[in-house]
Amino acid sequence: MRIFRPYDTPRDGAPVLAAGGVSRRRLPLNFRAEDLPLFEDALEMVIPPTLLLELADVGVSPEGMLFKGARILPESFSSPVTMNYFLGRRRSVLKFLFNSHLLRARRRFERDCLWIVDDWSAGYFHWLADALPRLYAARKAAKDLVLLMPHRYRRLEFVQSSLKAFAVGGVEYIGPGEVYFCRKLFMPSMNIVPSGNYNEEVVRGLREFLFGFYGEGAGSGGSERVYLSRGRAPKRKVSNEAELLDTLREFDFRVVHFEDHPFEEQVWIAARARVLVSSHGAGLTNMLFMKPGGRVLELRRRDERERNWFFNLASASGLEYFYQLCDAENPDEGPHTANLVVDPQLFRENVRLMLAE
C-alpha cells in the first residue's frame, strides 16, 4: 500500500488564491518574562500561499477520506500527527479500504467539486478557523463548483448558517453508505504549518465578508463586555466559576452561553464586544468577529505549551491579547478534558488591566 507523503510540495502552476507571508505576533499585553517559553515559538511563522489544487479521479468516503485506489491522500487529515495516528492502525486502514471499495455503493460524480474539510473540520473551531477561510479564499471559483462534504455536516447548525453567506454551485452530502468518485476535485491547499496559524489577510477578509452578509447590527443581544461560560460543557470548565461572578458583575460583564444562540447571534454578540473573556475552548473562536482593537483574555492551563491557537487568532484579527495561567483541577487529567481552577484575585487584576485605557 503506497501512501502519499504528507503535505507534498504544491503542484506547479496551481492558481494562487491568497498570497503567503510572515505572521509576526506581539507578546501579550500582560506578558510575564517567566512565561516566554509559552509564546516564543509562536512569535513568527511563515504562512505559505493558498493554492487551488486540482485532483482527478479521487474517491471520497462518507467519513471525509480522500483516496485513489489503495492510496490515502494526506489532504484528508488536519496534520501529519493525525494522519500518522490513523495510518499506524493497519487494521483500521484495511477496514476503510475494504468498505470503500467493496461494501459501499459507488457513485460516479461528473460535476466539478470543491473540497474544504479535513478530519477535524466538523468541530466549531476548525470549521471557522480552517474550513471557512478555505472557502472564502476559493469563493470566486466556488460559484461554478459543487461543494462536497460528508453527511454529518448537514446536521451542524453553524455549518448550515455560515454557508448561506457563500454562492456555490450547489452542496452535495455523501451519504453513510456511499462512496463518491469525482472526475475533478478542486481544493484550496491545506495548511502546511500547524493548525492554529492563519493567513491574516484571509481571516480579516472573511470577517468583513460575513459582516456584509448578515448586515451591520443584525442579530440580537450583545454587550460591550462579554464573559463566555463553559459551565454547561462536559469538559474543560472553570470549576470555581462562581468565585469569579462578583468581579464579572462589578465590571458589568454579560455572562453568555453560546450554546443558547444560533450562529448568526454568536457573530453579533462577539461583534459588539469590546472585551471578551473565556477559558480555552471552541466558543473563544468567535473573537474572529470582534472589531480590530478589541481585547481578549484567555484562561489557559498552566502546563499547556503547545496550543497558542487563540493567541495567534487574536493577532490575525487585530486584537489585543491577555492571558491567565490556571491550574488543572485534576493535574493527572489531559488538557483536552481537565477543568481549570482560576485564581480569583489574579482574575480581578487582569480584568482591571484589560479595562484600563
Image (spheres, rainbow, N blue to C red):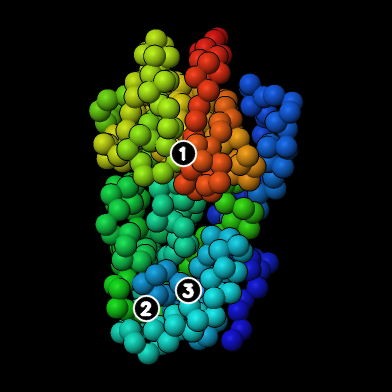
Provide residue 46's location: percent of width, then percent of height.
70, 48
Q: Is residue 189 visible?
A: no
Mark 1 is on which residue type? Asn
Q: Mark 1 and mark 2 in contact (Cβ < 8 Å)? A: no
Q: How crowded is mark 2: few (under 14 residues within 10 Å), some or many (20 or more)?
A: many
**Relative depth, front residue between 232 and 220:** 232
Q: What element carries label 1?
A: loop
Q: Nearer the viewer, mark 2 or mark 1?
A: 1
- Give me the C-alpha separation between circle 2 and circle 1: 41 Å
Q: In which quarter of the image is the N terminus?
A: bottom right
Q: Is mark 2 on a helix, strand or loop?
A: strand
Q: Mark 1 and mark 3 in contact (Cβ < 8 Å)? A: no
Q: Which of marks 2 and 3 is nearer the N terminus?
A: 3
Q: Mark 3 and mark 2 in contact (Cβ < 8 Å)? A: no
Residue at numbered disc 2: 180
Mark 3 is on which residue type? Leu
Q: Is residue 53 above or below residue 92?
A: above
Mark 2 is on which residue type? Tyr
Instruction: Say which quarter of the image contains residue 111.
Output: bottom left
- Give me the C-alpha separation between circle 2 and circle 3: 10 Å
Provide residue 100's location: percent of width, then percent of height.
40, 83
Residue at numbered disc 1: 339
- Give the numbered dot on residue 66: 3
